[in-house]
Amino acid sequence: MNDASVKVESSTNSKNSKVVTETWNSETSRFGWPKLGVPEVFSGVAEQTFARMKENHEKMKTASAALTDVLQVTYPTAAKGAADYGAKVIEMANVNTSTALNFVRDLVNTKSLSEVMKLSAEHAHKNFGIVSAQNKELWELAQKLSTETAEPIKQGFTKVLQKVT
């Protein structure tokens, strides 16, 4: 609309309504402020920026899909590893409970304080060895789980990031 001026009127049928009339031309904005001319350079920059944004959006969309695929492939390994770890903890708890119950049974059968002291020392020594072995086994299982899970994720992220950049 390049006409010299545009006139807009609005009215209603109500008795108490006012007729609003606004007039503006191509040299001023609707609010009476002077219009600023935008140089062609800025419109070219805006188009380039929009094109770059669209391209980056597509790259990120592709990267997001690839990362989702990596996580979907890795998830079963992580779930199996977590289940194995949980099963091992339950197995160890069973062993520790049996050991404790055996200790209490043997403790009830003692006849003197020296037997109680001897039995307690033996149990503590034996239990220390068992708990140390269990901790080592759990640590190795956790390392295996983290390696089997983290390495494919790390490789997948590296591939995706190399494609994006």
Image (cartoon, rainbow, N blue to C red):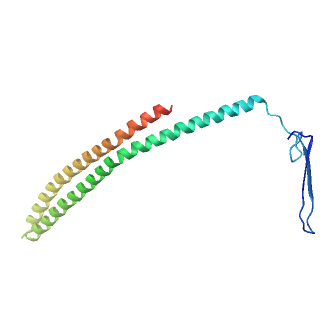
Q: Residue at x 57, y 36 (%)?
A: 56
In the shown orientation, is residue 165 left or right of residue 31? left
Q: Position of residue 132 (x, y in %)?
A: 20, 50
In the shown orientation, is residue 100 left or right of residue 160? left
| Depth check, front residue: 51 or 97 | 51
Q: Position of residue 127 (x, y in %)?
A: 17, 56
Taking the view exactly as shown, the residue that stands out farthest to the top is 41
In the rendered image, which quarter is residue 115 located in?
bottom left
Q: Residue at x 87, y 48 (%)?
A: 31
Residue 95 to residue 72: above or below: below
Q: Residue at x 90, y 66 (%)?
A: 13
In the shown orientation, is residue 16 left or right of residue 132? right
Q: Residue at x 13, y 59 (%)?
A: 123
Residue 165 to residue 25: above or below: above
Q: Could you tell me which quadrant the N terminus lies in?
A: top right
In the rendered image, which quarter is residue 97 located in?
bottom left
Q: Position of residue 25 (x, y in %)?
A: 90, 42
| Depth check, front residue: 86 or 31 | 31
Counting labels gives 0
